Image (cartoon, rainbow, N blue to C red):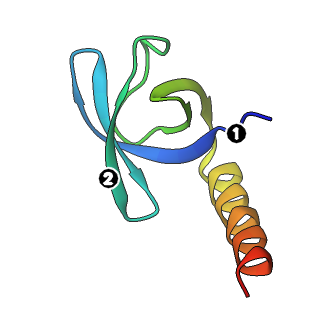
Amino acid sequence: MCLAYPGKIVSIDKQSGEIDFDGFLKKVNLMLLPDAKIGDYVLVHAGFAISKTTEKEAKDTLAALKEVQNALYR
């Protein structure tokens, strides 16, 4: 099973961007989303932003992932 994690683009430098994953910043490749801009929410898999998403979908996904984590590590 593959999982794409949502985050918000906070900076862009050519084909890479710094993504905020709920407080954790990571540099990812944006070459698959040439129209991505600062403030966009994206889904990231294996270091690549693979699609755009909405802020609501991103936050809902993060909340669901936290619920799973809490259930697994009680």
Q: Name the image quarter holding the N terminus.
A: top right
Of 35 and 31, the residue lying toward us: 31
For this orientation, the residue located farthest to the front is: 73
Q: How far apart are labels 2 and 1 at the CA level?
A: 18 Å
Q: Is residue 73 left or right of residue 34?
A: right
Label 2: few (<14), some or many (≥20) within 10 Å? some
- Give above or below for 16 relative to 58: above
Residue in the picture at 73% in, 34% down:
2
Which circle, 2 or 1, is nearer the viewer?
1
**Residue at which label 1 appears:** 3
Tell me the residue that label 2 is attached to: 25
Looking at the picture, does residue 13 appear above or below residue 44?
above
Of residues 23 and 52, the one drawn nearer to the viewer in this rendering = 23
Residue situated in front as seen by the camera: 72 or 22: 72
| Pointer 1 local density, CA inside 10 Å: few below 14, some 14–19, many at least 20 | few
Percent of width and height locating residue 16: 29, 23
Amino acid type of the residue that numbered disc 2 sits on in the rendered structure: Leu
> Percent position (x, y) of residue 63?
69, 68
Where, quadrant-wise, is the C terminus in this rendering?
bottom right
How far across and how far down the image is residue 72, in percent? 77, 75
Which residue of the protein is positioned furthest toward the bottom in this rendering? 74
Residue 59 in the image: state x and y as whole percent: 63, 60
Q: Decide which of tag 2 and tag 1 comes sooner along the chain.
A: 1
Count how many numbered circles sit on residues in the image: 2
Q: Is residue 62 left or right of residue 72?
A: left
Per the image, label 2 sits on a secondary structure element best described as strand
Left or right for 28, reference 69: left
Q: Amino acid at mark 1?
A: Leu
* Element type at mark 1: loop
